[in-house]
Each structure stands twice: as structure tokens, then as C-alpha cells.
Image: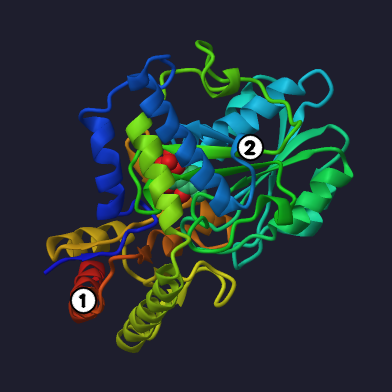
Amino acid sequence: MEAYLDYNATTPLDPRVLEEMRPYLEGRYGNASSFHRKGQESRHAVELARERVAARLGVEPGDILFTSGGTEADNLAVRGTVMARLLQRRHLAVSAVEHQAVLHTAAHLEKRGCRVSYVPVDSQGIVRLDELTKAVSEETAVVSLMHANNETGAIQPVGEAARIAHAKGALLHVDAVQSFGKLPVDPEAIGADFVAVSAHKICGPKGAGALYIRKGVKLESLLHGGHQEKNIRPGTENVAGIVGLGKAAELLGEPEREEERTRVLRLRERLEEGIRKAVPDVRLNGPVSGRARNTLNLAFPGLDGETLLMNLDFKNIYVSTGSACTAGSVEPSHVLLAMGLSEKLARAAIRFSLGRFTTEEEIEYALREIPPIIERLRKAATEDKK
Ligand SMILES: Cc1ncc(COP(=O)(O)O)c(C=O)c1O
């Protein structure tokens, strides 16, 4: 038995996505820029995928640019905007709980002379709008705020952020990598200038993503080369990956997805209740409501998350800690630290994330295995202290 409870890290490929991609990994290998029929076959596939992604976001196909994933889409929106506005504006504001794709891009720009505001969050992990308002000025080129947090699932007030940014002439980038497929993502309703999505978080392939760019918004390319993707993102298109992203996006519109979201919520609630019952002092990190339904971030006081993760791994239960490995040492999650958790408690956290193929059996299996592991580790921890 195994339980894959790490959907926020990546998801299994939906078999229908694989089916749609397969011809583009086999016989349909034409370059989408070639004028002959073999090339045009690939071009049509890319444009169909663009229509499907656009339809899911409620925007026009021409507003969608394909990238190599969420990281590149985030880099392009943030760095591309700052570089395009460098003569007028040299400041950017990002929340303290962004993904590294945004945080490290901001740090890179900071080293090259830009000013960055890392906007704090409250104890639930929600960005402080009063602090965002203070940070944004006529000098701000772009504000970057994620829609749902990858570690806690906390849903951010992106619509309010758009109003705050626009009031000062700044643009808003929304990293929707974790919300796409879990919450409605409507760039126009949010008022976003950019929205990043990634295929491998929605049962699509790794290495494919897209950036919505509002019409008329200028940004500088990160790469230089051919004329692909409107001269903004050169490089021969990853046709199979793009086809997979398109199919995965299309599947998000199926009526069954609504049932799936309810089913995932029930399973997550069952997991949460079961763990709470067995481990009463467990602490929920993130908001009780107002979070992505599939995500459960729990701190187990007195335990080390990495050790717990490895012990769960022995039982084929796959979860995450928010820790990052930096220069050989494991750093506690920047998200949990920003929420005010002590380093010790942040190190005691585990993220469970569920999705399309999570079964009741997996949850019951996890609930059988987790309590004795925790009891054993806690016992060992107290013995160590003696
Ligand atoms: C919120 C968020 N943004 C960006 C990314 C990066 O996406 P990708 O893995 O497609 O580069 C991730 C992936 O974990 C994420 O969770």
C-alpha cells in the first residue's frame, strides 16, 4: 500500500493527457515553425492548446504565452516587467511567502540595484494589505502576489492587491500555479496584468506552463533567439508539453471536476480530523477557511518534520516539509517563519496535499500508519533528552 499525499509538489499525469501528448512524442514531430504540413500539424496543436488554456482562464488565446513552467512564467512577469520599466521605476513589492521563483527573482534584481519590499503576512499567512499599501509607490514597477500558497494553501487577496498596485501605476503579477484547478482563476475579474500557471500541478506534464499577459502590457524577454511566442519567448516549442498543458486545462472544465473538488475536500477533512484525534496537540498552519481545499499543513510539536517525512517514506506515504536545502543545511520554511512560527515549530511541520487520484484507502492507510510513527518518534525524542 502507498499513499501519495504530495500533490502540491507535483501530480500524476492524467491518462487522457498522456494519450493526447503521445502522437507529438512519436510520429508528429514537426517543428511548429515549419511551413510544411508536418510543421503545421504541430502549429495547430499548439494553437489548440492556447485556446484551451485561454478558455479556462476566460481570456483570449492571444493573451497566453507558453513557457517552460511556473518558474519561467514568474521570472518573465517579474523580471521582464522590471527590466521594461527600469528607466521610470526601480522598486518591486512581493509578499514574504512567495515561491522561490518570485523571491529569488526579486533578490536577483535587488543585487542589481532595484529596491524590493518583502511585504509581511499575518499569523494565518495572509498578506498584510496595510503594509502592501505602504510599500507601493509611484516608483513600483510590479507587485507579485501568489493566489494560493503552496505550503499552507492560504488564499491571498489578489483583487485588493490589484487595486493597490494600479492606484500607483504598478502592475500586478499573480502566481496562480497552486490555485489553477482548485479555485476559479479569472485574470480579468482579479484585475491581474500577469497570471502564471503550470501544467504539472494540474495532472499535466512537467516542464510546461503559461503566462497570461494583459493586452498592451510591455515586458522584456528573458531569452533571445527566434521569433516564437511573439518574439517574447524564443525557442522551438515543446509541442508535446504544450499539448499536455492544453489537455490538462481542458479537463479542468469537466463537470466531474466539481465533484472531485468536493471529494478532495472530504478526504482532506477526514485526514485532518483523524490526525487531530490521534495527536491532539497538532497545530494547523494556515487559515481554517480561505485555503485551498486540498492542502493541510500541520506542525507536530516536539518532532522534527524531516525525520517524520523519512519515517513516513519507509511506509510509502509521501508528504513534504516546507524546508529548503540551502548550502548543505536544511532551512525551515520561510513561509512558516513569516507567519511567526518559531524555528523549532516550523521544523516540526509537514504538508499533506491531495488531488484527483487520492483515494479513501490512501487516507485510511495514512491514518493507520501516522499515529504509531508519531508516538514512537516522540518517545525516542524524550529518551534522547534524558
Ligand atoms: C506557487 C508556485 N509557484 C511557482 C512554482 C514553480 O512552478 P514549476 O515547477 O512549473 O516551475 C511552484 C511549484 O512548486 C509553485 O508552487
- Label 1, residues with CA under 10 Å away: few <14, some 14-19, many ≥20: few
Residue 354 in picture, x, y percent from top left: 35, 66
The answer to whether residue 263 is above or below residue 303 is below
Q: Amino acid at mark 1?
A: Lys
At 44% from the left edge and 72% from the top edge, which residue is drawn?
A: 261
Helix, strand, or loop for circle 2? helix
Residue 81 in view? yes
Left or right: residue 60 compared with residue 39: right
N-term mark: 2 or 1: 2
Left or right: residue 109 compared with residue 19: right
Q: Quadrant of residue 311?
A: bottom left
Helix, strand, or loop for circle 1? helix
| Tag 1 residue | 379
At 62% from the left edge and 67% from the top edge, which residue is drawn?
A: 123
| Tag 2 residue | 63
Residue 215 in picture, x, y percent from top left: 73, 35
Residue 271 in picture, x, y percent from top left: 33, 79
Residue 51 in picture, x, y percent from top left: 53, 43
Considering depth in this image, is 61 or 353 the residue closer to the camera? Answer: 61
Distance (Cα) linking label 2 and label 1: 56 Å
Considering depth in this image, is 92 or 40 the residue closer to the camera? Answer: 40
Q: Quadrant of residue 31?
A: top left
Q: Amino acid at mark 2?
A: Asp
